[in-house]
Amino acid sequence: MEYGPDHAELYDLVFRSRGKDFGAEAEQHSRLIRARIPEAKTLLDVACGTGAHLAAFASLFDHVEGLELTSAMREVARRRLPQATVHPGNMLDFDLGRTFDAVTCIGNAVAEVKSADELVTTIGRMAEHLVSGGVLVIEPWWFPENFIDGYIGSHLAEESGRVVSRISHSTKQGNRSRIEIHCVVADSTGITGFTDVLSVGLFSREQYEAAFRDAGCTVELTPPLRLGDGRPTSPGIFVGVRK
């Protein structure tokens, strides 16, 4: 999915106003990592988006890098973290030529691959960038039994004289979910709007776990991240250690 520049610029505002705490989430992931590799110093955040989590990780690890396919998101991340490397690349086939103590993929991005085979390939790519004993942390999209077909989301955010209305509609299409997002933005210059459509795979817990094992990692499902009002952002967080 290629987010346009409008969506990239508004991404953090919208999710912060929904109760998302990027710093607290990064700390939670860091605890999961250091419970398994206490001396972890290096981290790669795959599909790092605007770099909001990556910026928090930068205060928790000695060295961090990001990977992001979408150019608009990548540019926001680079402005936020001029001291860190944010690589262009697809999580399906990236090769950075080095390994890290930890690799993360947060925000359901891993499920945007097109098939179960691509899920296996993608998780394998992430695992290849881990040191032996390194930790892989992945936030999945909803499992088929958790997904609400026809779900409607709505939200209004306001900051610094700008108001954003965001409406989404999610439907099941075979083994994928289609998420249509409409945003209306009002500020002192007037009113504008745009639409994005996401296609996200409805992979089962068993498919994720099999992909971890195929990548040579252990796997467990830990409790999910939650928004400020207590709503979970996924069915849980997968954590694995490269054998």
Image: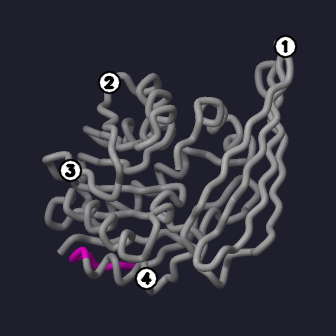
- Mark 1 or mark 2: name the one nearer the start of the chain: 2
Is 49 above or below relative to 189? Answer: below
Look at label 1 and name its amino acid. Answer: Ser
Most prominent secondary structure in the magenta stretch?
loop
**Badge 1 or badge 3: first in the primary sequence:** 3
Disc 4 residue type? Answer: Gln
Q: Is residue 243 above or below residue 6?
A: below
* Percent of width and height locating residue 116: 42, 76
Provide the residue span drawn in magenta: 215-220
User: Is tag 2's residue or tag 4's residue first in the polypeptide sequence?
Assistant: 2
Per the image, label 2 sits on a secondary structure element best described as loop
What residue would you read off at disc 4?
Answer: 207
Q: Residue at x 57, y 41 (%)?
A: 3
Distance between the Cα atoms at labels 2 and 4?
37 Å
- In the picture, measured across the screen, residue 25 lies left or right of residue 231, that is left
Q: Please tell me in which quadrant of the rendered image residue 212 appears.
A: bottom left
Type of residue at label 3?
A: Asp
Mark pair 1, 2: CA separation: 33 Å
Total numbered circles = 4
**Residue for badge 1:** 188
Residue 198 drawn at (x, y percent): 62, 56
Q: Confirm or deny contact between disc 1 and disc 3 (CB under 8 A).
A: no
Sequence-earlier tag: 1 or 4? 1
| Residue with the mark numbered 2 | 83
